[in-house]
Image (cartoon, rainbow, N blue to C red):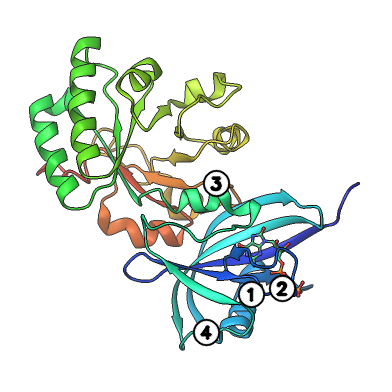
């Protein structure tokens, strides 16, 4: 049976400490007792953003002042085929005064998520576990010892996601470096993915793998890792990453980079167009530092990835 497609807008209210808000559906609704992001159906003539602002006024008594587009996912329920437009609600006015849920809960990063959870929301909750900054290693350029030392410092300063990207190191050196990096990332509770060398990622027990755009396009299945991402430059590559069910993508270059100073970047407007309506988080890459985070997220990025800009070196 085909069901009518229903657009729904849902908001991830984010507090300054990184906690996000879930509400428990009331007894007289479908999926009563399940935990959801506040929001509701888009009404005729409304954009999803307008619908969310209205729903949050009606449901929680707050006035949204800063909304960022994030992910979009479709899900076929028994009762409806929904297209969920998720936004990050970065700022609002007023005090929460819930009128529709049985309970509200702020979930801090790393804390257990209350259950049961709406079936469509699994990938969304997983995406919220993905840190906002990815550091990409460059041991080939700066040396393994120096890279490990700046990695340690960045981890102490809160870096939570590292991509080992050392295709030019010989296999033995790459493995030694990747193991040393993994040990440090694990000790600080972060995630580590290995670029290209899936065998190495498996052998060392990395959290995931990262595919080059070429490998992504040649793949018809998602490799079996908890976290799988890919580098993308075009909408077609991003859509292929989405079709394979990848957990994240990188898109760039957004700005001209140190390695390609004459090459114009995509810019934020184009970044926003290319990532519009995707189901998985996308990191912006290329000539960026943590100072670009707010602009990146306003354009729809999950966060930023950087080869130079996150290690705090003079060549940043
Ligand atoms: N609000 C919200 N709805 C979600 C989420 N995830 C998800 O699958 N949905 C689905 O999207 C639909 C939204 O329905 P709703 O009951 O909240 O809509 P509404 O406030 O407009 O209610 P109404 O039916 O009384 O008009 C439901 O089918 C719900 O299962 C989520 O995180 N938040």
Q: Is mark 1 within 8 Å of ligand 1?
A: no
Question: At which x and y percent is residue 257?
Answer: 28, 40
Q: Quote the CA–CA distance across marks 3 and 2.
A: 23 Å
Helix, strand or loop at label 2? It is loop
Q: Are marks 1 and 2 in contact (CB under 8 Å)?
A: yes
Rendered view: 37 above or below 229:
below
Q: CA distance from mark 3 to mark 4?
A: 29 Å
Q: Disc 3 or 2, which lies upstream in sequence? A: 2
Q: What residue is at 56 percent from the left and 71 percent from the top?
A: 23
Give the mark, 1 or 4, whose residue is nearer the N terminus. 1
The C terminus, quarter of image: top left
Q: Which mark is residue 274?
A: 3
In the rendered image, residue 220, in percent from the top left (x then y), is placed at 61, 22
Frontmost of labels 3 and 4 is 4
Which sits earlier in the primary sequence, circle 3 or circle 1? 1
**Mark 2 — residue?**
46
């Amino acid at each position: 049976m085909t069901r009518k497609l229903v657009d729904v807008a849902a908001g991830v209210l984010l507090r300054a400490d990184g906690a996000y808000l879930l509400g428990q559906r009331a007894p007289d609704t479908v999926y009563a007792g399940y935990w959801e992001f506040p929001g509701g159906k888009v009404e005729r003539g409304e954009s999803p953003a307008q619908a969310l602002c209205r729903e949050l006024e009606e449901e929680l008594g707050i006035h949204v002042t800063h909304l960022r587009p994030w992910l979009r996912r479709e899900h076929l329920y028994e009762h409806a085929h929904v297209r969920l437009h998720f936004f990050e609600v970065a700022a609002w006015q007023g005090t929460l005064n819930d009128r529709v849920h049985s309970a509200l809960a702020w979930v801090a990063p790393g804390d257990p998520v209350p259950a049961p959870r709406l079936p469509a929301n699994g990938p969304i909750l997983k995406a919220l576990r993905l840190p906002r900054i990815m550091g990409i290693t460059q041991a080939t350029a700066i040396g393994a010892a120096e890279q490990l030392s700046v990695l340690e410092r960045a981890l102490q300063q809160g870096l939570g996601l590292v991509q080992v990207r050392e295709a030019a190191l010989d296999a033995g050196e790459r493995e030694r470096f990747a193991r040393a990096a993994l040990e440090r990332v694990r000790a600080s509770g972060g995630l580590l993915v290995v670029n290209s060398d899936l065998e190495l990622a498996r052998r060392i027990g990395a959290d995931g793998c990262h595919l080059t755009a070429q490998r992504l396009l040649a793949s018809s299945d998602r490799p079996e890792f908890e976290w799988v991402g890919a580098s993308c430059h075009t909408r077609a590559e991003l859509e292929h990453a989405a079709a394979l069910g990848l957990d994240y993508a990188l898109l760039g270059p957004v700005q001209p980079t140190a390695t390609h100073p004459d090459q114009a970047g995509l810019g934020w407007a184009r970044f926003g167009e290319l990532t519009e309506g995707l189901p998985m988080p996308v990191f912006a890459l290329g000539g960026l530092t943590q100072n670009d985070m707010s602009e990146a997220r306003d354009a729809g990025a999950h966060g930023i990835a950087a080869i130079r800009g996150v290690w705090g070196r003079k060549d940043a």
